[in-house]
Amino acid sequence: MLALSALFVLCAASGVFCGPFHASCKVDWEATGQCSDAQTKIVNQIKAWNGPSGCANGGEKCLYSLVSQSSSQVKATHETPVKHYKDDLTFTFSQNGNVCQIHGYSTSETWYAVLDYGTNYCNLNNLITGSGLDKMAGYKESASDSTCTQFSSANCSKY
């Protein structure tokens, strides 16, 4: 039996689907400013999209729930409005001088989920853009198909 790392290399060489082996996404962002401000903006956006009102017109900017919050981490969930799948989200914040570095991770609670149409990326991206963090000076995002399931085909206006 091949180890997962060997399987991933084989996958990459063959041109077959490559990426996380479970529907998930890891994204890194950075922006000029204080992480406490960035964290507040994300928490406020989670709370703003807590109910079903953002689900109107087929969108998924809704049904977010805050699970926990500490000085360096925010945990939340997102439920899809149609099938009611749940995803776990974690944002980790670290201050590096005047730059806030944010690591985001979203993963499906459904054990058998492999493909997700970019939903786990959109879970994170929607909160970043909804909170306005993408408008901050020095904003950068780092994500790819190798760290996010179906990243390159993600449609965050839908998911």
Image (tube, rainbow, N blue to C red):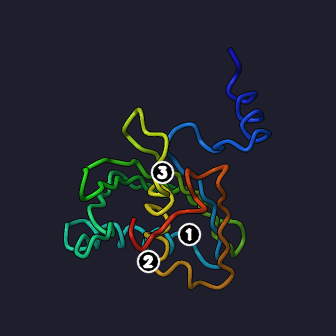
Q: Nearer the viewer, residue 17 or 22?
A: 17
Image marks 1 and 3: residues in contact by CB distance under 8 Å: no
Q: Would you name the residue on which mark 2 appears?
A: 131
Structural distance between the alpha carbons of marks 1 and 3: 20 Å
Residue 159 is situated, as x and y percent measured from the top left of the image, at 39, 65
Q: Secondary structure at mark 1?
A: helix
From the image, state whether disc 2 or disc 3 is nearer to you: 3
Disc 3 crowd rating (10 Å Cα; few below 14, some 14-19, many 20+) is many
Q: Secondary structure at mark 3?
A: strand
Residue placed at 43% from the left, 39% from the top? 113
From the image, state whether disc 2 or disc 1 is nearer to you: 2
Label disc, if present, on residue 133 of the rendered structure:
none
Say above or below: 143 vs 34. above
Residue 67 is situated, as x and y percent measured from the top left of the image, at 32, 51
Say above or below: 146 vs 38. above
Say above or below: 154 vs 90. below
Q: Of label 2 and label 1, which has the lower sequence position?
A: 1
Residue 98 is situated, as x and y percent measured from the top left of the image, at 69, 76
Residue placed at 53% from the left, 78% from the top? 133
Disc 2 crowd rating (10 Å Cα; few below 14, some 14-19, many 20+) is many
Q: Would you name the residue on which mark 1 appears?
A: 35
Amino acid identity at mark 1: Cys
Amino acid identity at mark 3: Ser
From the image, state whether disc 1 or disc 3 is nearer to you: 3
- 28 relative to 120 in the view: left or right: right
Q: Of label 1 and label 3, which has the lower sequence position?
A: 1
Q: Of label 2 and label 3, which has the lower sequence position?
A: 3
Label disc, if present, on residue 106 of the rendered structure:
3
Q: Nearer the viewer, residue 89 or 115?
A: 115
In the figure, residue 145 lies in which quadrant?
A: bottom right
